[in-house]
Structures are given as structure tokens and as C-alpha cells.
Amino acid sequence: MAILKRIVPEPIIKDYREDNGSYYEAKCEQCGRIYYPKRNTSKYCSKQCGTYASKGMMLANPISNEVEKSFEEIRNNAKTIQDLENDFKGSILEKLKRERRFKK
């Protein structure tokens, strides 16, 4: 059996948020995860990501910018349940008007 690629386990990411509510939020330069670093100049979410970056290696499943942009677009274009209900009711009324079942 030939080895195709190495799948690394998910890194253990420490949460450095403080009790008083102040914290930094950063994005890992290697895997793209959002994490809470201890200092504001931190680049990587875990020791594993830092090691991979220093050796010039890529993780198995990095989060690409295209995927991130598409999720952002979906969040921005998402409609509320009320909007969807109104759209549905409007389309039903238009259909009934065309079939002349509903007069108004």
C-alpha cells in the first residue's frame, strides 16, 4: 500500500481570553482559523502550525480565501425567516391572480 499524504490531527488551540472581557482576535497565517492569541503579534494558532510554516509545509485542509469569501457572501445575503415567508406568500398570490382565482 502506497502512502498518499499525511493527515495531521487538529491542533490544540489555547484560549487566552481574559475574565474582564479584553482579548485579541487573530487569524492563523497557516491554516486560516480564527483564534485568541496571548500577544498581539502572534501569527499561528498552535505550535503545529508554526512548525509547518517554518518548514514550508502546507496543512492538509487549509481554509482558502475563496471559501471564506463565499461564506461571507452567504452570510450577507441570508434572508430572515420572515422575508422568506413574505416571498412565498407573494408568489402564491401572484399565481392565484394569474389563474384568476383570487380577485383583489
Image (tube, rainbow, N blue to C red):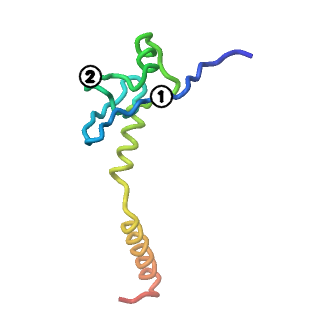
- Write the residue at 40% across / 23% down: 30
* Above or below, comparing residue 81 to residue 26 in the picture: below
Q: Residue furthest front?
A: 19
Q: Residue furthest bottom?
A: 103
Q: Is residue 1 left or right of residue 100?
A: right
Secondary structure category for the residue under label 2: loop
Which quarter of the picture shows residue 14? top left
Residue 47 position in % (x across, y down):
43, 19
Residue type beneath disc 2: Thr
Mark 1, other Cα within 10 Å: few <14 / some 14–19 / many ≥20: few
Which of the numbered marks, if any, corresponds to residue 41? 2
Which of the numbered marks, if any, corresponds to residue 25? none
Residue type beneath disc 1: Ile
Residue toward you, 77 or 22: 22
Report how far apart the C-alphas of labels 1 and 2 lie in the structure: 19 Å
Count of numbered marks: 2
- Name the residue that disc number 1 marks: 12
- Write the residue at 40% across / 34% down: 66
